[in-house]
Amino acid sequence: MFKGKAFKFGDNISTDHIVPGRLAHLRSNLPELAKHVLEDADPTFAARVKPGDFVVVGSNFGLGSSREHAPLVIKMAGVSAILAKSVARIFFRNAINLGLPVLICDTNKIDDGDEIEVDMETGVVRDITNGNKIAFKPIPTFMSAILNEGGLISYIKKHGDFKL
Amino acid sequence: MGKTLAEKILSEKSQTDVRAGDIAVARVDLAFVQDTTGPLTIREFESSFSSLANKDRSVLFLDHAAPSPNCQLSTDHTYLRGFAASAGCRLSDVGDGVCHQIVAESIAKPSDVIVGADSHTVTAGGLGAFATGMGSSDVAVAMALGRTWFRVPESVRVTVSGSLRQGVYAKDLILHLIGLLGADGATYQSLEFSGDTVDKMSISERLTVANMSVEAGAKVGLFAADDITHDYLIKQGRGGDYRPISPDADASYTRTINIDASTLEPTVSQPHTVDNTAPVKELNGVKIHQVFLGTCTNGRLEDLAMAASILKGKKRHPETRLIIAPASRKVLLQAIEAGYIRTFLEAGAVILPPGCGACLGLHQGVLGDGEVCLSTANRNFKGRMGNPKAFIYLGSPATAAATAILGEITDPREVL
Ligand code: SF4
């Protein structure tokens, strides 16, 4: 069960909004890079987000570059899950590989600043502020196995290979 | 029921009969990284694994910051060079060119499975390779195991027929298609190109189209490998790498999109999304401060030849900078021999070393506040060229050259 505040963003937030290319020189200094998380979408986000909070977005979140630094800095900010109408393919895979849940659901029912609760067992998001209950799509089986091991590298270390 | 290109390649490389929707664990023929995703990949690799599954099929490219503009990126380069030397894998150093161009010129084969820590890895689909972008962890694991997992994608068939009109190129075709599909219109799917227009396209054009398939969200953009592919590989000195591959006639697609090439117009993407397309003629007159010609999308010899034919004997507009980055050392050498580089310099252009150049906003052409660029690259996201207060339009090399001369967005047919 995760609980925290919703930080809402719109559609088509690209990996350039999350960690722009101009900051590539900070990619080997992750704590410094993380201070800029989502800077080009909301320059105040990094200062306001607290561990446990949620990034709640519209459609096609994380489109663009394959940089895994994008979900990585979101995870480093303490975000417990990303709630999205849809996500771009590489971003989805990267987030799961890092052990960061991405939950596909109708995010129109959540407003910016709402207190929300996510129950991974039942697959339900509860918006405490407005009372909405929203079901999210189950994470595909194989990706769920990776997520449950805390990410791809730990999964492979434990199983030695892909176990379908 | 027959198979799509994606189903054929993934069945072969997983040695199982797989169909769209199945999970396949496939052998990886090439795993690569570049200098902005590579350090994370290699650190993950070094902390968890001991050796590369296949040294000859693991490559590190230093192309995004080439040469490096600052000490942090230089140190990343040093780290990658050190790893390549100790692990014994191939390194493509500063000045060799953009990873996807070098993969096309010297590595990719039809039917290969290629994973790269760069979203435009899809470029090699132009040669009939199942090539796709992944993140650092996935590529680290692919380098260690020599295998990766895929959900076999559903395929969309894009059938293009008829002849492109004068002034209309492969770039206009793919921009048009992305406008039609939307930035997430093909997410998780394979775009498979066919039709008489596609059958006649050069490899350079197919690479341009495959390169941008990811801008509609696609996992791969695939072309059959045919005689044109064979001729290209022969010209690269590796005719032996050729193997024909085509989809089965009764393969099943989620949908078919038919495009009549003869109706297409020169097209541009407007700020700040690639699917925000419009015919160039509707934007005639938009003032442009910088034109950038190059990248893995349009930095090949054919692209430079097209631009040179328009710029020959002309000058860039005095208020419009013209920056040109050939995609590889080989392209640069050929462009020098053909006289294109002289033409560009005489037209007032700046020539960058082969590499990504100004494309991703690190250096070599960062835009100022409020400035507007017309680029032949594949992305125009806010902040892409180093400044969230700048604006980027995307177009063909011909549109870029015409625009550089007039200083405002110009339909290339006005100068052809
Ligand atoms: S040229 Fe641009 S799009 Fe291509 S690999 Fe380099 S940065 Fe990426």
Image (cartoon, coloured by chain):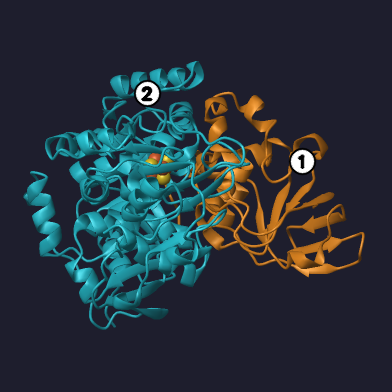
Chain colours: A orange, B cyan
Label 1: state its secondary structure.
Answer: helix
User: Quarter of the image holding residue B80?
Assistant: top left
User: Badge 1 local density, few (<14 within 10 Å), some, or many (20+)?
Assistant: some
**Callout in the foreground (2, 1):** 2
The percent coordinates of residue A95 (x first, y second) are 59, 48
Tag 1 subunit: A
Residue A45 has which mark? 1
Residue B143 has which mark? none
User: Quarter of the image holding residue B260?
Assistant: bottom left
Q: Is residue A6 left or right of residue A100?
A: right
Query: What amino acid is labelled 1 in the image?
Result: Phe
| Of residues B287 and B384, the one drawn nearer to the viewer in this rendering | B287
- Some atom of ligand 1 lies within 8 Å of the CB belonging to the residue at label 2: no
Task: Tell me the residue at 29%/77% (across/down).
Answer: B262
| Of residues B206 and A4, the one drawn nearer to the viewer in this rendering | B206
Residue B226 against residue B144 in the figure, above or below? below
The percent coordinates of residue B243 (x first, y second) are 13, 59
Task: Tell me the residue at 25%/62% (across/down).
Answer: B12
| Of residues B284 and A86, the one drawn nearer to the viewer in this rendering | B284
| Residue corresponding to mark 2 | B67
User: Quarter of the image holding residue B250?
Assistant: bottom left
